[in-house]
Amino acid sequence: TGGSAFSSGALEALSQVAERACCGSTRGAVQRVVPAGLQVEVSLADGRLASVSGFDLSFMDSRYRGVSTQALHIADGQASEAHPTALKPVQLTDRAVAFELDLGAIANGKGLPSAGSSRALELKGCSSGRATLAAIAVRFQLAPGADFGSASLCYGQWLTGGLTIRAGEPVAAVSARLGFGNCWVDWDWASSEEAPFGYMVLSDWYFEMLRDGARHDLYDAALRAEIAAVRERKGEKAPIRVLDVGSGDGILSMMALRAGASAVVGVEHVSSIARASEDIVRANRRSAAGPSAPLPSEEEAPLEVWCTDVRGVAPPEDEELKFDVLVSELMDASGLGENLVCLTEGARRRLCREGTAVIPANLRLSAVLCEVRMPDIAGTN
């Protein structure tokens, strides 16, 4: 069935079974299809990035989610456990059944929905908020007449711009559409609060990284410790400059400012991400977001984003412009895949003071041999 129950072309394949089903040389009806039925439920939810380590990163959603061509994997709201980095949207409406399909009938040439079939959804707000995600749950019926089980697949479709939901009120102009390759949600663009245009596709793993609170907390603690050590060494009034290599969304740069750095420079070579990080920084300054925002004004604590490859940054002629702390998060799943060692070593040697602290200070790679087997399913190896 694929990640969204339809992406492997199951409905199209079933529609061809009636033409080809045979027993020996005699054509006949398909007697049983397992699963016997399929039910699709839709609800609207808020899937935006919440406050991450005290910073507002919502600009990453508005710029990069809208043109995602893949279904977003989400944690089922009824699941007892979910990984801390999983997308766990806040449900804002009840669930409505969009489609209920008799797969046995489809296999025998009956009940096949036409491509692009659309059905209006009767949704009602259960909480007030801004719906940014259509949560689509797929349930299977294993035998005719049996109950539909709990959701086996849960995925999300980003609603660019979002829709305003009010508790207790019906949601108008939302419909579900079914194709051979997918199920998706249409909504009235006039109700959208932003123009429905995306900027760039980012993979889901990038947003998982943004939701990784444990990693953020470790970086925050390390920055606080190293900046405090520099202040103790240089004096309370001395300027402290921090370099963030591969600054991305800018969260480590903002952490450095919050920890007491007098100036921060982030270097990010992907232009669209660099521009998004500038929006994020502005949104977290007190001059824009009010006195409760985590960052002081630009005049008090400047944070620059240089859109370039750090290897092309010329060493400063003035020793006072060299950096006191270097931080980087250029780590993929292997720890080395983003050229972490080369980029940080070169930047430390050319752009930083003698003895500059580097975060992370060390990288340990561990290996173990494992046996991985598929589990037995219903007694079948």
Image (tube, helix red, strand yellow):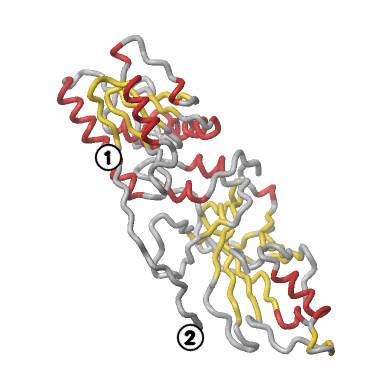
Q: Quadrant of the N terminus?
A: bottom right
Above or below, 44 relative to 141: above
Of the pair 164 and 145, the residue shown nearer to us: 145
Give the residue pinned by disc 1.
Answer: 362
Distance from the alpha carbon under mark 2 to that under mark 1: 47 Å
Residue 374 horizontal/vertical position (percent): 47, 73
Above or below, 274 relative to 201: above
- Residue at 56%, 52% in the rendered image: 132
Could you tell whether 18 is left or right of 266 in the image? Answer: right
Could you tell whether 234 is left or right of 122 in the image? Answer: left
- Mark 2 Cα within 10 Å, few/some/many (few <14, many 20+)? few
Could you tell whether 306 is left or right of 14 in the image? Answer: left
Of the pair 258 and 267, the residue shown nearer to us: 267
Of the pair 370 and 7, the residue shown nearer to us: 370
Above or below, 11 relative to 165: below
- Residue at 58%, 81% in the rendered image: 148
- Residue at 61%, 51% in the rendered image: 159
Give the residue pinned by disc 2.
Answer: 379
Amino acid under disc 2: Gly
Residue 198 horizontal/vertical position (percent): 62, 41
Secondary element at image label 1: loop
Find residue 230 and report its image quarter.
Answer: top left
Of callouts 2 and 1, the N-terminal one: 1
| Contact? badges 2 and 1 (CB < 8 Å) | no
Find residue 310 and report its image quarter.
Answer: top left
Name the mark on residue 235.
none
Secondary element at image label 2: loop
Amino acid under disc 1: Asn
Find residue 266 and report its image quarter.
Answer: top left
Residue 154 horizontal/vertical position (percent): 54, 65
